[in-house]
Structures are given as structure tokens and as C-alpha cells.
Image: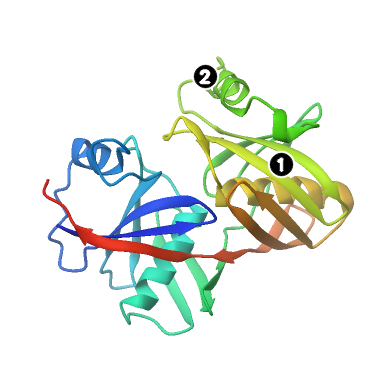
């Protein structure tokens, strides 16, 4: 099987051109093996680019454990991959598990329109919201030295969230316009270098408190930007922007 490897601020993905449907029967165990960093290619997730009638393409995303969700960085890398395959030019409309998305690509930077967020729940100084995937946002200090795995795993496996799981984001304010975010991702069950839906969730909680429309985000894998418009119900016109880069391509025997 031919594959491509992409990364978006360190969030890495196995990409498969599945427009012919040849990989429709890829099993959960196949996906787990391909994403394994010891016995496979190694990635946070796997994405099949499928042909669909009502959009330019479909982003069929799987976490490294084989579970399905929406992935912001994965979607951005999918746009870069579709552009590489000459499926799209600078603008596109594609389908994902949470619906239709718009995106733009220019000079390796992909700007992705996220779904509207109508509700942000407060839990003291912590927040819960859905940006295509469910997220818990917790503000902390000295994030560089924070035990993201231990604390993220505890919240993700707490009685409230154990059944369906939740992504857990730890956030430190760096300035009035920049946050530092580290994320424990469900499905990967570990900290990743970046999480697109997670930084979007963190940015929206910050925008809500500070009445802003733009936030820069520092992650372990680089820099992202989030733009949004606040309305009476929540946020709309939400865009996630950052690099999406092809790392290598190859063939692997399943």
C-alpha cells in the first residue's frame, strides 16, 4: 500500500489516497498497526481521502487506536494532501465526520473553517466545549513543567468522561494575544505535539473572557492561529490557521 506522511505543528498522520476505494476495508487492527511507532509507520492518526459527490473530497479520520473523530490538524493536512494530488487549487469544500468545512491553502499554510460553537460550559476556572471533538480546558501556570500525561489521563478517565472520553487541554496565558497549550488526546491516550480542535477550544475560552477575535497559540510543535466572531450564543466564523507539511511517502506491506 502506498502512503504519505504529513505533520501539522508536530501532529502527524498517515495519509492514504483512497479515491478508488481500494482501502475501504482497512481494519481497525490495520490502522493500529500502521500508526504504531515501533511496528508500523508511526502517527497520531490515519486519514483516508475518499471521493464523494457533495464535496471536493471526504476526510475519513481515525485516531491511532482506530476510533473515529474530527481532527483539526488532520483536516488541515488533508487539504495540503488534496492540493498535492491536484484535486484542489487554493480553496476547497470538503466533508468530515462533523459535516462540511471550507478551507484555504497558500504557501504551505492551511486555514480551516471550524464548525460554530454554541455553548461553553464553565466548571469553576475550567471549561468544557465541543469544537468538532469534545474538549476540557484547564488554565494552569508553569505549563512547561506540568505533568500533562498524568493530569490529562486522570480527567479523561474520571467518572464524568470515562465512557465517551474527552480531550484535555492545559493552557497558560503568555500575553494578551498568545496562549501556550498542551493537550492529552483521547484515542491517542497520550500528549500530542499539537491538537487543532484543542487549541481552538482553548482560544475560544480565552476570547470569551477577553472579548477578542484573534489568539496566537504556541504548541510543542510550533505556532497556530485562531480567529472567531462572538455572538449571543457562542462563536461563529471560526478559523484555525497553521502549517501542514508532507514529511515523506513510501510503501508498506500490511
Task: State left or right for residue 118 relative to residue 246.
Answer: right
Picture layout, residue 179 above or below residue 19: above
Estimate how packed mark 1 is, as few (under 14), some (14 to 19) or many (20 or more) residues with alpha carbons within 10 Å: some
- Residue of label 1: 120
Tell me the residue at 53%/49% (across/down): 132
Task: Say whether residue 94 is visible.
Answer: no
Q: Is mark 2 on a helix, strand or loop?
A: loop
Image coords of residue 150 (percent x, y): 58, 20
Give whichever of 226, 12 is nearer the camera.
12
Residue toward you, 68 or 220: 220
Of circles 2 and 1, the one toward us is 2
How many residues crowd around disc 2 within 10 Å: few (fewer than 14), some, or many (20 or more)? some
Residue 22 position in % (x across, y down): 12, 60
Q: Quadrant of the N terminus?
A: bottom left
User: Does residue 235 sit above or below 191 in this rendering?
Assistant: below
| Camera-nearest residue between 49 and 146 | 146
Which residue corresponds to the image point at 37% horizontal and 69% vertical from the top-left? 81
How far separated are the C-alphas under marks 2 and 1?
21 Å
User: Which element carries disc 1, helix, strand or loop?
Assistant: strand
What residue sits right under mark 2 in the picture? 157
Amino acid at each position: 500500500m502506498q502512503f504519505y506522511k504529513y505533520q501539522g505543528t508536530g501532529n502527524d498522520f498517515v495519509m492514504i489516497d483512497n479515491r478508488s476505494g481500494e482501502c475501504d476495508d482497512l481494519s481497525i487492527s490495520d490502522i493500529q498497526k500502521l500508526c504504531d511507532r515501533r511496528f508500523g509507520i508511526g502517527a497520531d492518526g490515519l486519514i483516508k481521502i475518499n471521493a464523494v459527490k457533495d464535496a471536493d473530497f471526504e476526510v475519513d479520520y481515525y485516531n491511532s487506536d482506530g476510533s473515529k473523530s474530527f481532527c483539526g490538524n488532520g483536516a488541515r493536512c488533508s487539504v495540503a494532501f488534496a492540493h498535492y494530488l491536484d484535486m484542489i487549487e487554493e480553496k476547497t469544500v470538503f466533508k468530515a465526520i462533523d459535516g462540511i468545512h471550507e478551507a484555504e491553502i497558500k504557501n504551505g499554510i492551511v486555514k480551516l473553517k471550524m464548525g460554530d460553537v454554541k455553548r461553553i460550559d464553565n466548571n469553576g476556572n475550567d471549561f468544557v466545549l465541543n469544537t468538532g471533538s469534545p474538549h476540557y480546558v484547564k488554565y494552569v501556570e508553569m505549563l512547561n513543567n506540568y505533568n500533562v500525561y498524568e493530569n490529562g489521563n486522570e480527567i479523561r478517565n474520571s467518572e464524568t468522561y470515562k465512557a465517551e472520553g474527552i480531550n484535555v487541554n492545559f493552557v497558560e496565558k503568555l500575553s494578551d494575544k498568545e496562549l501556550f497549550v498542551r493537550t492529552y488526546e483521547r484515542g491517542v491516550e497520550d500528549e500530542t505535539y499539537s491538537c487543532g480542535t484543542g487549541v481552538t477550544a482553548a482560544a475560544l475560552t480565552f476570547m470569551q473572557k477577553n472579548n477578542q477575535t484573534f489568539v496566537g497559540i504556541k504548541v510543542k510543535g510550533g505556532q497556530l492561529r485562531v480567529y472567531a466572531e462572538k455572538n449571543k450564543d457562542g462563536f461563529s466564523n471560526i478559523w484555525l490557521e497553521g502549517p501542514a507539511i508532507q514529511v515523506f511517502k513510501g510503501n508498506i506491506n500490511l
